[in-house]
Image (tube, grey):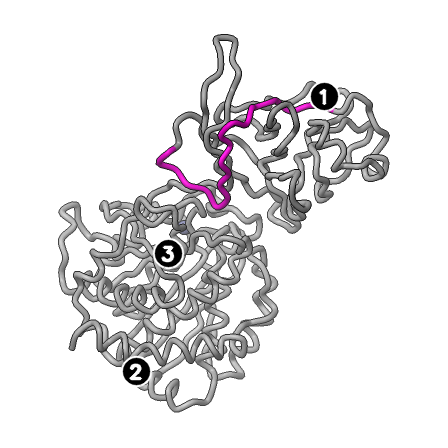
Amino acid sequence: MTAGSLQAQNKEFVSQLIEDYDHYKESRLKHRRFKHLDMQPLLEKLTDQGFQVKTLGQSYEGRDIKLVSIGEGPINILMWSQMHGNEATATMALFDLFAYLSQDSQEVRNMLTKVSLHFIPMLNPDGTQVFQRRTAQGIDMNRDALNLACPESNILKETREALNADFGFNLHDQNIYYTVGQTGQPATISFLAPAYNEEKEVNAIRKSAMQVIAVMDEALQSIIPGKVAKYDDTFEPRAFGDNIQKWGSSTILIESGGYAGDPEKQHIRRLNFIALAIAIHSIAESQYQNIDEARYWQIPDNHRNLNDLLIKGLTVNGPQGAYPLDVAIRRAEQDKNGQLPLRYYGSIEDSGDLSTKYGYQVIDAQGLEYAGAQVYPQTLADIEAAQRLDIAQLMKLGYTALRLAKLPPFETKFPLDLLNSERTPPAWGLLPEQAASFVLMDSGLVRYVIINGYLHDLKSETNLEAHGSIFK
Ligand SMILES: [Zn+2]
């Protein structure tokens, strides 16, 4: 069978999944910062829907780590998510997948006679609690496959062994700044069939992983053409993916990256759901075996070339004269102990000739002149007083920050940067790591104001998601 006919077969399956997705979507998971406690009622419901739910053991801080299982088939598939606590996209997709698997359809019943599915939806609940990558012990579990210092690592290893899993799906989130090859497209999904040795050899086990990835890639290309990449396959002797491949389960790493306008990754969650469903279907039907694994190698490598905002060719007037500069800005998520709501902190990622870099948002600043951040001269009492000001007018005058006698709480979102009345201004500028607030002038008039890495175009409408930083 050729790859072409495989695509034709799966096309209908995939379009049906897309059409029906809203029926499966677990509506109680709405964003990436749900906790172990939020997951418990969802797990309890599963036992009434034909799933087995058992406790595998406890995390370092004593949270139960659960295994969800369904199906009686001879092929064992194990999927685990949130080994890194702040990588929650696939966990949401797993709950959508559970709804799909619990429906009483011929398609699903048939599939579950061929495969047995096992899921660990939240492998690192302690990390999830504070939305951090590492475990409560401060260990990156993905470097603990041999050392086994974390109870969570032992649980994963023992579960894989007990199930003698044929397939392992290692579900993560990656940085939103990865691109597909040297294009400006975000790597919305990246795959890897990890190497099991330094030589990066391909045995039958790894080959199967590559083939299943090729099937998923083909399905995703119909939804997000050009936004799928693959990870570098350098052997990492301490990583779980590499070792699980070595221990004999065909291992597939799926990384959820970025997608423009999807900060909570709800579209990417749906893509995960579709990719996982097509993978299970393909494994159940042994269909992946007919795809040429060369398809895997054709998936472009991912590179970290993206930024939230890229400003190209602005003019800086230095003491020795004018010179051109490109500026790349990224906005880092900030939260309060892993809880909502979120804020972002914008800083300079790089500056110089950035002609090889990309941005989710790009502006051509040819002919525009750089002017630094500017603090409004009068100190205001509080945020209420600040809200009474005409912000658009302040921006037009080139102001990027206000001083307040009393700063508002963390969650307050205000368009300008806010400073404590006594504080010396932070390091605003164009050097890497500096806070990203400045002004771009066009023939002596303010054209753009950049505050906390957000672009305000004075010729268009207000940027509603934008907010400044609060400098205490
Ligand atoms: Zn990860």
Of callouts 3 and 1, which one flags the residue occurring earlier in the amino acid sequence? Answer: 3
Determine whether the beta carbon of the residue marked 3 sits less than 8 angstroms from the nearest atom of ligand 1: no
* Label drawn at residue 227: 3
Task: Tell me the residue at 55%/72% (across/down).
Answer: 26
Disc 1/disc 2 C-alpha distance (Å): 65 Å
Q: Which residues are magenta?
A: 355-375
Of callouts 2 and 3, which one flags the residue occurring earlier in the amino acid sequence? Answer: 2
Residue designated by label 1: 423
Could you tell me residue 399's position as x and y percent? 71, 27
Task: Tell me the residue at 32%/57% (across/down).
Answer: 191
Q: Please tell me whether mark 2 or mark 3 is closer to you in this view.
A: 3
Could you tell me residue 269's position as x and y percent? 48, 63
Crowding near the residue tagged with mark 1, few <14, some 14–19, many ≥20 C-alpha atoms within 10 Å: few
* Label drawn at residue 163: none
Identify whether 135 is placed above or below 72: above
Residue in front for this viewpoint, 457 or 303: 457
Instruction: Tell me, yes or no, whether the two marked residues, 3 and 1, touch with CB atoms within 8 Å.
Output: no
Viewer can see residue 246:
no
Crowding near the residue tagged with mark 3, few <14, some 14–19, many ≥20 C-alpha atoms within 10 Å: many
**Identity, as a three-letter code, of the amino acid under mark 3:** Lys
**Identity, as a three-letter code, of the amino acid under mark 1:** Arg
Viewer can see residue 364:
yes
**Residue 247 is inside the magenta segment:** no
Task: Tell me the residue at 51%/32% (across/down).
Answer: 365
Could you tell me residue 93's position as x and y percent? 47, 67
Of callouts 1 and 2, which one flags the residue occurring earlier in the amino acid sequence? Answer: 2
* Residue 410 placement, left or right of 442: right
